[in-house]
Image: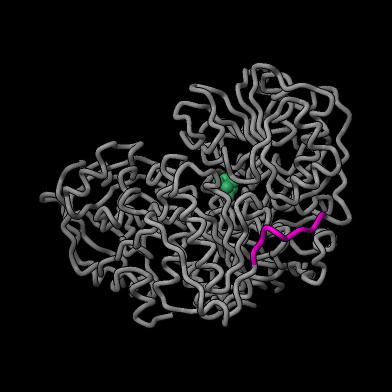
Amino acid sequence: MGKTLTEKLIAAHLVSGSMEPGAEVALRIDQTLTQDATGTMAYLEFESMGIDRVRTKRSVAYIDHNTLQSGFENADDHRYIQSVAAKHGIWFSRPGNGICHQVHLERFGVPGQTLIGSDSHTPTGGGIGMLAFGAGGMDVAVAMGGGAYYITMPKVIKVELTGALRPFVTAKDISLEVLRLLSVKGGVGHVMEWGGPGIAGLSVPERATITNMGTELGATTSIFPSDEVTRAFLRAQGREANFTPLSADPDAAYDRIIHIDLDTLEPLIACPHMPDKVVPVRSLKGVKVDQVCVGSCTNSSLYDLLKTAAMLKGRTVAPSVSMSVSPGSRQVLTMLANCGALSDILVSGARLLECACGPCIGMGFSPNSGGVSLRTFNRNFEGRSGTADAKVYLVSPETAVAAALTGEITDPRDLGLDALHVDLPDRFLIDDSAVLAPASPEEAAHLDVLRGPNIKEFPQGKPVGDAITAKLTLKVGDNITTDHIMPAGSKILPYRSNIPKLSEFCFAVCDKEFAQNAKAAGETILVGGSNYGQGSSREHAALVPLYLGVRAVIAKSFARIHAANLINAGILPLTFANPDDYDALTQGETLTLTGIDAGLDSGTMTLHAGNREIPVCGSFTKRQAAMLRAGGLLNYTKEGND
Ligand code: F3S
């Protein structure tokens, strides 16, 4: 029996474990990346392990989330990351150089290598055949220290593409179609492996749009083969030496195969407030639009912005629409400027924003209150735009521009424009002057790490023990995202290395008094519905609850990365044996969890609520059980474990 590409790459990086789906496997990690919102904590954690130099082939620290300076906090954080990177052997991408996933693809990604990043859209690297995972900052710290990265051996879904995209139908529409078919939970426990004759017509930026949005399916990761398209992209980046051909065996067996005929696909749109609420654009024709944003790590490549410029050229953004364009990298921006496409964008009336995440996390360009915003991004969760009552729709750049020009949701095919023909250059403009190399080991010995007052220590986990008595300080419903647990946004991001300050915002969208009540309770057990912790990989969504005394979260089900982050923090993620027991619990009551020590191995524990006994389950590997006994991953690593 042949092997899938996923199996081949896992086998090539296997440190320990069996490759049976569902079993835990430990992988050797070649590359890591961090962004600033999660990076400060990852580097504080790395420092705490007392290792001088990173042991990866390449580690890169990006500043792309909170690039705007509104006080000393961001500047202090950037200087801390820059100095800690120089000292420990990490490359540093300066603010303004671009969004981590776009720059990594352009300048650092290598087909066939493993990559983990403290950002949930790290699977973007699968667009050039990397095995790339979104992980917690603590996992990244451990990988930088040479430790393995542990995943549950995934099943593999093949998405077989046939045909070719028609004019104004795009890679984004392919992503939205898969979300429509599978939902935001449809990829959980799976790698999405892309193949079929249709992939030959997709450029690397288009493939990267698709692997980027595999995260919205809950997939472990997504990957394309590395082929002549990949080689051409790397050659144009001056990195053909990094090319390796990679593909699945022709007789590889998949757990499921999904067929998509590109010839029949049409422009699609995800409605508020979930990426899988997907309908044809034409079905919303005429809905008035207030704001349009082109950019984010999903659609900010040169390819995307050349198409945007071509549609805007000689036309004007409707007076009722405010439009922004954020290039994904300085390379993209410089090339747009050099070929004149930037003028076409600016003359149309669109605003140019910095090469950074910006509006994707509610920074610098939020919609008006109650406004309708069409975005080329990957997420449209409620409130994420920075405006609580905005309605955010997810679309392709073509559909975004069509709405910007007409002032209403418009199928781009109805504009009567000629089909767009955008050729990627044979050679990108290569200028790495905004990427700083680390100091040599000799120089590094004399370097100081610069710590401003916003850099606070991270909270220490406690061993879970055998019983926990704690207050049910908060009970929440289904689909709680990490944005609900620990919101992002311009007011909060400056404190990402300051957990005591951040804790004031924890769960504030669900219950304004949560932080205060949790502190007063001393110890807390949280109760949640299905898919608890979906969304970004934000580790702070585990560390801040830890600081506030959360010892366990009991939910109907968990998102993979968040459950792993909770375990890393020393917090127990448990599920109800009988989901109906969720209804029997009342916020404010005192709960006792017993049988923890034995339950870490057997998988069952008992929750006592008054005189009721509720069975709860936890599925932990031996290593995770040991971590929880030690009080989290850092304590476990400090004890000398791999
Ligand atoms: Fe940035 Fe948004 Fe991507 S925050 S990394 S552009 S999902």
Work out whether residue 458 can be spotted: yes
Residue 389 lies in the magenta-colored region: no
- In magenta, the rendered stretch is 429-436
**Does residue 343 sit above or below 175 in this rendering?**
above
Q: Quadrant of residue 154?
A: bottom right
Closest to the observer: 228 or 140? 140
Q: Is residue 148 visible?
A: no
Q: Residue at x 69, y 43 (%)?
A: 327
| Residue 603 against residue 376 in the figure, above or below | below
Q: Residue 189, how many percent across, how many down? A: 52, 59
Q: Where's residue 54, x and y in %?
A: 54, 75
Residue found 54% across the figure and 43% down from its top: 68
Residue at the image point whose x is 46% and y is 64% from the top: 450
Q: Is residue 460 left or right of residue 169?
A: left
Q: Quadrant of residue 269?
A: top right
Q: Nearer the viewer, residue 312 or 434?
A: 434
The outermost residue toward the front is 446
**Image mark count:** 0
**Left or right of 524, for residue 126:** right
Location of residue 162 in the rendering, given as x and y in whole percent from the top left corner: 80, 48
**How would you classify the magenta stretch by its main secondary structure?**
loop
Residue 611, percent from left and from top: 10, 51
Please check the rendered image and state whether residue 435 is part of the magenta-colored stretch, yes or no.
yes
Task: Pick the quarter of the image with the C terminus.
Answer: bottom left
Q: How is the image coloured?
A: one colour
